[in-house]
Image (cartoon, rainbow, N blue to C red):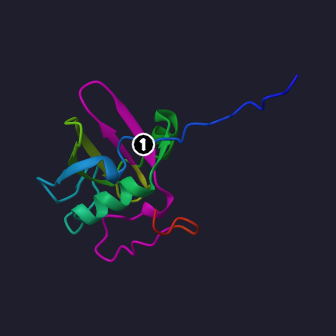
Amino acid sequence: MLAIPQLHAAPRDPAPFWHPRHVQRFLIETPSARSFGQGQCGHLLMDEKRLRFFLAHAKPGSSTDYDQQMQTDDCNAEGRIVLKDGRRFKVSLDNWTGWGAVSNQRTTQFLFCRPCTDILEPDFAFQDPPGQRGR
């Protein structure tokens, strides 16, 4: 009897839904950051470049990890994305922690981006982590 080897065609992991390649439009209605405490945030701004960088490098995280890392006086800025399939999401970025969230009326996905610490600062470097250039 002839043995036929099994084919293990593992499906490629699709990029997370928030990845920039799935985004049709980026919207920044209010670029200024704000604080939920007493932080000074007026000099911090959100723009499309920062939003793209965060979404390209962010990894899913848990709400527990987000809560543990949250800083009351951290500055936060929001943008919106419209995906190619028409879904709309709010994207919230915390400046100092590298955390953010993608949410709609039904769900929130917490995201962590190690190279995104201080992403809203005017002199943010936009450096890809090692081994991720051109992702």
What residue would you read off at disc 1? 16
- Which amino acid type is shown beneath numbered disc 1? Pro
Is residue 36 in sight in this rendering? no
Identify the magenta region. Answer: 100-128
- Residue 14: x percent and y percent? 46, 41
Q: Residue at x 35, y 58 (%)?
A: 95
Left or right, residue 22 beside residue 42: right
- Which residue is most to the front? 1
Position of 29 relative to 67 (above/below): below
Res 101 → quadrant: top left
Q: Is residue 69 magenta?
A: no
Q: Is residue 120 magenta?
A: yes
- Residue 54: x percent and y percent? 37, 57
Position of 19 relative to 40 (above/below): above
Q: Quadrant of the N terminus?
A: top right
Left or right, residue 66 beside residue 107: right
Is residue 44 in sight in this rendering? yes
- Residue 11: x percent and y percent? 55, 37
Q: Residue at x 31, y 47 (%)?
A: 22
Q: Nearer the viewer, residue 133 or 67?
A: 133
